[in-house]
Amino acid sequence: MEYSVKSGIPEKQRSACVVVGVFESRRLSAAAGQLDEASGGFLTQLLRRGDMEGRLGQTLMLTNVPDTLCDRVLLVGCGREREFGDQAYNKAVAAMASALQDSGAVEAVSYLTDLPVKGRDNPWRVRTAVQTTATTLYRFDQLKSRKDTPRRPLRKLVLTVPGRRDLAPGEAAAREGQAIANGMDLTRDLGNLPGNLCTPTYLAERAEQLAAEYPALSVEVLGPKEMETHGMGALLSVARGSRQEPRLIVMRYDGGNKGDKPHALVGKGVTFDSGGISLKPAAAMDEMKYDMCGAASVFGAVRAALELELPLNLVGVIAATENLPDGNASKPGDIVTTMSGQTVEILNTDAEGRLALCDALTYTERYHEPTSVVDMATLTGACIIALGHEAHAVLGNHHPLVNELLTAGRDTGDRAWELPLWEEYQDALKSNFADMANVGGRPAGTITAACFLSRFTRKMRWAHLDIAGTAWTSGDNKGATGRPVALLTRYLIDRC
């Protein structure tokens, strides 16, 4: 898909389709009003006879609109004008994208970016329109023998800005939105792949492919022998039940000044999680292929940073492994020694993500000396109970960093919510036999999981994103969401 930005009046656009908004009840947007005036009240006549009310998400495709240069006009319902905020704007853009994809129009000019969204400027509307369009049109069908592709899919979308002086900011916003969308597509592709294809080795190969595509990226891959040398007993303990060897994948992008400490993104990459000896219930276990979406999000954010050529240094570290039951698998009650030297009593082998992450975090601190560290993981079902599927949980030991992530989430609509990380919660991890247990019981499960990770990040500016409720959706629309790539990319852009 090609995105571009231009200014101009709608009735003069030589295009396969011009898109304008209609509010309830049958109230024309400014661009729709211009088309109506140019066509001698054609749109008003249609609305008066009841062809469209303007309900949010409603669409009406028109042809042969008098005194216009376009082949079609698409009217998109925007709901009540006084309630037209972020969510309504996204729904209107999604409705537009779906209607255009089915229309046969291979290119279109959208005036939805001219609509007034409370508290948002034109660059935000352009960037969000690109992201929402790409998300709406995304399909994962590469493993199907028969692909359901449109005969004439939408190939070019032009987004409008008010005037010529708005072109440069609009073009920058479109470029940013495209980079985020491409990163989200990569994240969704990796997440949607089944566990028999997307193995730890496969993730390492994809990192090397990304480095081949972008020379500014360098990749290092550690296998079991190197992990043993570094003393990564926790990560290796997760992999013991699998025939697939684990991988620690390190992607390094030096786009900033030489010597500047990098920002670090650390992702949980459990490519399939059966729970190990603490076996999960069979229902919906297929969704445990999504337990590597933290790693997939690192891929997506790194790709977006590379495409935007951000002037900063960045390191992405991924702990990739499977968690399966086997005669050699870790057992409840086993005690392992982490790379940091701390010992952990494994009370539940299904709390494996924190075991993989703790060694990855120690490695990141020791070998990359980052200025900040953000880890992301589909870590706890408790996060879904606490926040549902709308917000990521964020916890950390550095309040400015947490606030920066919250701000990035609000700006992109990829929102997070802070949970406390008080010292009192640490008591839940006490063990009679090791420095700590890997679980703290049912109460405050998301918080105690973060408490575990915090014991390996005391020397860092660190924040943790629990994306268990946001990384994928279930049901008829099952699939990876690409979150929190938008939040992470905005966070990195703000660091520039």
Image (tube, rainbow, N blue to C red):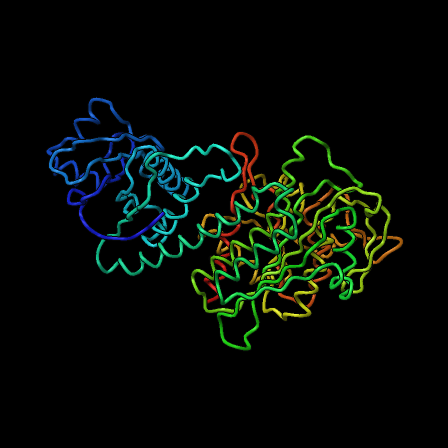
Residue 214 showing in the rendered view: yes
Give left or right: position of 425 versus 168: right
Q: Position of residue 289 (x, y in %)?
A: 63, 41
Q: Position of residue 428 (x, y in %)?
A: 78, 50
Image label count: 0
Q: In the displayed orientation, state which residue is furthest to the top.
A: 49
Q: Residue furthest right?
A: 433
**Nearer to us in this view, 409 or 146:** 146
Viewer-nearest residue: 454 or 307: 307
For residue 445, side relative to residue 53 (left or right): right
| Left or right of residue 27: residue 80 | right
Q: Residue at x 73, y 43 (%)?
A: 443
Height in image: 30 above or below 312? Answer: above
Residue 79 appears in view: no
Q: Residue at x 67, y 67 (%)?
A: 365
Q: Is residue 149 left or right of residue 451?
A: left
Residue in view at x 43 percent, y 55 percent? 179
Front residue of this view, candidates 54 and 11: 11
Image quadrant assignment for residue 37: top left
The x and y percentages for residue 111 are 26, 44
Residue that extends furthest to the bottom in the rendered view of this protein:
259
| Image spot of residue 361 (x, y percent) | 68, 61
- Look at 22% across and 55% down and name the residue there: 163
